[in-house]
Image (cartoon, coloured by chain):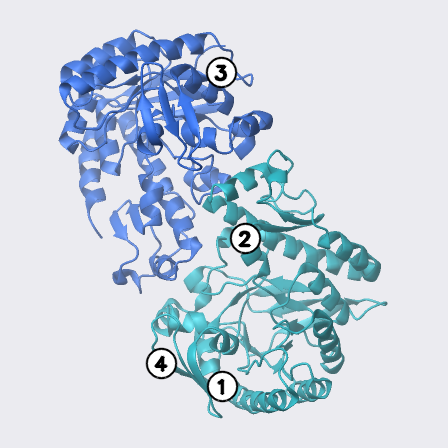
Chain colours: A blue, B cyan
Amino acid sequence: MASLQFKIKATDAFSKARAGTILTDHGSIETPIFMPVGTVGSVKAVTQQQLKEQVRAEIILGNTYHLYLRPGLPVLEAAGGLHRFNGWNKPILTDSGGFQVFSLAKSRKINEEGVIFRSHIDGSKHLFTPEKAIDIQRSIGADIMMAFDECPPGASAYEYAKSSMLLTHRWLDRCFNQFNNTPDKYGYTQNLFPIVQGGIHHDLRKASCEYISAKAAAGNAIGGLSVGEPIETMYEICNLCCDHLPVNKPRYLMGVGTPWNILECIGMGIDMFDCVMPTRNGRNAMLFTSRGIINIDNKKWEHDFSVLDDGIDCETSQYYSKAYVRHLFKSKEYLGLIIASIHNLAFYLWLVKQARLHIEQGDFVSWKSGMISRLQQRL
Amino acid sequence: MASLQFKIKATDAFSKARAGTILTDHGSIETPIFMPVGTVGSVKAVTQQQLKEQVRAEIILGNTYHLYLRPGLPVLEAAGGLHRFNGWNKPILTDSGGFQVFSLAKSRKINEEGVIFRSHIDGSKHLFTPEKAIDIQRSIGADIMMAFDECPPGASAYEYAKSSMLLTHRWLDRCFNQFNNTPDKYGYTQNLFPIVQGGIHHDLRKASCEYISAKAAAGNAIGGLSVGEPIETMYEICNLCCDHLPVNKPRYLMGVGTPWNILECIGMGIDMFDCVMPTRNGRNAMLFTSRGIINIDNKKWEHDFSVLDDGIDCETSQYYSKAYVRHLFKSKEYLGLIIASIHNLAFYLWLVKQARLHIEQGDFVSWKSGMISRLQQRL
């Protein structure tokens, strides 16, 4: 079936930002977009109804490594894929499992064939290959699947980064081969995005972009950033990659980042983002708001009965007071982290929607610089 | 201002069950009713919106002991009471703090004046007296406040139960004295319910009912049950108390119980219930459903893609599959306990609503006996 379509609706005259729409068989996605992370098929502490009505998520992520281990493919296939299993009927993107294998699994061994690793849950032994990563993602039923890549540490030396990139490129060929030789599993179109690697080395990144671009995929991703390198380096590499990836395809910056990281990278031409920061930091009492950062645990909010954030269009954010949510965190109540997770995700979705509106309005750059200094304030 | 009103709409011809309406300044409550427990001002793992729309709760509980310690009265008073603090604008009932002081606080000492205890949070020393229990509940802003009582262990010997009951009665006089000499704190009517004590001793319970009834309160509660005594004893005492408490006032059985306990006690003339069981057991993977009990952790649900419970009118219960919720519990995802808490509470509210309908229809007793054997089945 036809790949997903990407239509650019507006491009900013003063930056490389663009506003567009991605059309998938599970509905459309307005870009730039932030994608909440639903590691094991659940965005932590948020119901599917809240994701739609409060957060206004348009697409969520699932993690291949986690879903493969638990509930496992027999359950997911019997359910008819992850959408049916978890009741999320909008688009789903899955990572390839590569990143988690390198960060979570035990005693992993990489060779040309793939990666042998042991489950962090029960120690059982598994092999992921590019072909298997595609098969698993087909079974999960992702609308957007990611190529299986090696993700080296942020500051890897040139030679290591180069050989890792070349391995990723060889794996990419095998991914596309498997992708092109297997049917969509559940009747709707599944797409495959390749991933640029190359560490912090400009010529490697450029070469990787060219290799990836030649695949003429439905969209392209930038991996291996926000993994320990300085933030200026991240911006530099992201910017360079955007210049060497196709203009007419969505660009996905994996695992990034803070609200201001996202705004800066939108300005470079990134269309899609994911990050665990809004939910993870939310569970640790850190709230991102339209006026700046709140540590809701802090005593200063004890008597502040104003709502969490009256600047964003989320019922939860406009319903509960800072004093109440602080009380919930001090009392270690589940409701505290539920509210914080919903709010932070809704804030991220609000932010990318605002970015989109300002791209369309033509004042994205000036809006962005004011917004970035506002958002970084500690309240 | 005028006390809450209780209007009996239907009485069952074959049992002592009745269906009624309690009118408060925060809205009406259809009885028999189950009241979710919101210990520190939050029903664990459930948002206020879900409580209204999914659970269909009509009144919730707050715990005086917990709220007094945290967030504390200065915060609650500055907020304008618990309703404004937690955003729950329907009725709230608070316990008197007595039960928690006896079960949670450290190094408590009881004397005629009241109870001196140390906070389980920071070890700080506090004194609760009948007068103070009323003052605190006024500040919390409960629509229904409870008298300060001593709650002796379930199997207390006669002499201990008797002297404890007599102390509770003397405290009750002081509670009503304080209640009658203090104004409603926030403009709406606050009511005080006395509590029957007397352990498992019939003559003490009867004497306590008579003492309590003489207060002509807006409603009456039965305390000191479901605290370790055999279930048949609980039923026996509950039944006896119902026979000796006013017919035209709501009767509240504190801290009870399982779904079948609730149905049996409705048949004896109880109108109001509260219990942590639906939320606590839910967090431990035990689901009460309209077809019986499910341990959702169990492997037998791994491939069961039917919804949690299609027999009750709750969107959450009819949305997520058993296999998905099992997966969430196995993966220790917050969403598992969120769904289980919402479902179990919605089930309890559904159950008392069904009881009400069958009381009105006149077939409560036959419906109850079929339902009780169904609900106790382990699926």
> Who's the residue at 50% across and 74% down the image?
B103
Given residues A1 and B152, the one toward you in this image is B152
Distance between the Cα atoms at labels 4 and 1? 17 Å
Which comes sooner in the sequence, label 4 or label 1?
A: 4
Distance between the Cα atoms at labels 3 and 1? 68 Å
| In this rendering, the label closer to the viewer, 2 or 3 | 2
Given residues A263 and B347, the one toward you in this image is B347
Residue A363 visible in the snapshot: no
Residue beneath label 3, please? Answer: A189
Residue A15: image location, x then y, percent: 19, 23
Chain at tag 1:
B
Residue beneath label 1, please? Answer: B130
Residue B235 visible in the snapshot: yes
* Image position of A199 (left or right of A308): left
Residue B44: image location, x then y, percent: 49, 57
Chain at tag 3:
A
Q: Which mark is residue B125?
A: 4
Kind of residue at disc 2 = Asn
SS at mark 1?
helix
Kind of residue at disc 3 = Thr
Kind of residue at disc 4 = Lys
Kindly indicate whether the residues beneath marks 2 and 3 are on one polypeptide chain.
no
Residue beneath label 2, please? Answer: B284
* Image position of B293 (left or right of A145): right
Q: Quadrant of the N terminus of chain B?
A: bottom right
